[in-house]
Image (cartoon, rainbow, N blue to C red):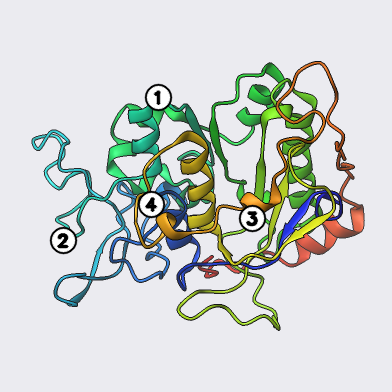
């Protein structure tokens, strides 16, 4: 429904061939910092996810020498207390260098932000972004994180920050063996909640996925890029029922949108610094865009539907593969 009423950006790709963990690094850093786009080992996965405190490793290649090795799944922070964090926040010695994130840039510029994502007590904490960066997990930035349902409260109260990242729980993620309807309902509840709240007139929502469903796609990716990804842009400020066919990259282009909106420097000149920012999708002159006192011209809300008994029975009889790396 959102795709019909708002914008489909139908040439959005992964900028790098990567599984879920790498895509979440790229989403806030515009690079993989030498990691090869492979999901981490599952050490302690059920409890700690994939980040600095996980005990997990992933394939990494030294950008200077090309030497390959497995390294802790952590972007270390050498500014941390070396006594408390002898490896820069990684659980073991690491050759991975520190890189900045969009969270660092927003902090420096006074741009408010929050990550609504699974916490350490919830499955798929590995998608939660912050745990993979020591200068988020072990600093005051960690206070900018909370479980996904908090976004509904903040939307209703009009206390959303300038920039929000919302990551679904496992059973809302639309992965194999999960309910597609449950995922649609979660997306609908978040978007509807923002539409019904006081921040809607000045909000742009980017709905995307970290990789693909891996069915055949007739659109080949640009050279060096990964698969084409869904991208729907929902906002009172977009041209309704339109398609944006400019070539974009889910991580870099959303970063470029944030940077251009809040006048931040790019993280990687050849990445987000060169990326298309979905600018052609927006028309700030549309009625209700950014203005108070009038309803937006386009406010199409999703219908939330209960999961049928038949679907619940099917899901119970077809549990997820515990070795599924996504």
> Looking at the image, is mark 1 or mark 2 earlier in the sequence?
2
For residue 76, side relative to residue 149 (left or right): left
Picture quadrant where residue 33 is located? bottom left
Dot placed on the residue nearer the N-terminal end, 4 or 1: 4
From mark 4 to mark 1, how far is it between C-alphas?
Answer: 18 Å
Under circle 3, the secondary element is strand
Q: Is residue 47 above or below residue 263?
A: below
Residue 173 rendering spot, x and y as whole percentages: 65, 54
Marker disc for residue 95 = 2
Q: Residues within 10 Å of mark 3 (few under 14, many from 20)?
A: some
Q: CA distance from mark 1 to mark 2?
A: 31 Å
Q: Residue at x 50, y 56 (%)?
A: 251
Tell me residue 279's x, y (percent).
62, 50
Please give the residue where the numbered disc 1 appears in the rendered image.
Answer: 110
From the viewer's perspective, is the residue at label 1 or at label 2 nearer?
A: 1
* Residue density around tag 4, few if under 14, some if 14–19, many if 20 or more, within 10 Å: many
Looking at the image, do the residues carrying marks 1 and 2 touch, with CB atoms under 8 Å apart?
A: no
| Image point (31%, 46%), residue name | 53
C-alpha span from label 2 to label 4:
18 Å
Give the mark nearest the N terminus, 2 or 4: 4
């Amino acid at each position: 429904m959102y795709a019909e009423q708002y914008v489909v950006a139908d040439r959005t790709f992964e900028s790098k061939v990567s599984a879920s963990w790498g895509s979440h690094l790229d989403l806030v850093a515009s690079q993989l910092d030498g990691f090869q786009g492979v999901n981490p080992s599952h050490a302690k996965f059920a409890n700690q996810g994939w980040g600095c405190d996980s005990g997990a490793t992933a394939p990494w290649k030294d950008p200077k020498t090309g030497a390959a090795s497995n390294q802790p799944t952590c972007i270390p922070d050498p500014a941390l207390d070396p006594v408390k964090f002898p490896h820069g926040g990684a659980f073991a010695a690491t050759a991975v260098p520190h890189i900045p994130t969009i969270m660092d840039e927003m902090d420096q510029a006074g741009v408010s932000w929050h990550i609504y994502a699974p916490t350490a007590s919830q499955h798929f904490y590995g998608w939660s972004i912050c745990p993979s960066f020591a200068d988020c997990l072990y600093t005051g930035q960690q206070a900018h994180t909370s479980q996904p349902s908090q976004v509904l409260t903040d939307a209703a109260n009009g206390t959303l920050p300038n920039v929000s990242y919302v990551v679904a729980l496992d059973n809302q993620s639309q992965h194999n063996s999960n309910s597609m309807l449950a995922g649609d309902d979660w997306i609908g509840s978040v978007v509807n909640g923002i539409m019904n709240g006081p921040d809607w007139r000045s909000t742009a929502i980017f709905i995307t996925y970290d990789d693909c469903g891996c069915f055949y796609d007739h659109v080949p990716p640009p050279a060096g890029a990964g698969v084409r990804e869904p991208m729907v842009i929902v906002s009172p400020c977009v041209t309704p029922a339109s398609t944006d066919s400019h070539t974009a990259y889910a991580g870099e282009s959303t970063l470029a949108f944030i940077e251009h909106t809040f006048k931040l420097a790019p993280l990687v000149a050849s990445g987000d610094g060169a990326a298309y920012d979905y600018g052609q999708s927006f028309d700030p002159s549309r009625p209700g865009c950014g203005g108070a006192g009038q309803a937006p011209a386009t406010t199409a809300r999703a219908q939330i539907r209960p999961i049928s008994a038949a679907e619940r029975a099917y899901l119970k009889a077809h549990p997820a593969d515990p070795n599924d790396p996504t």
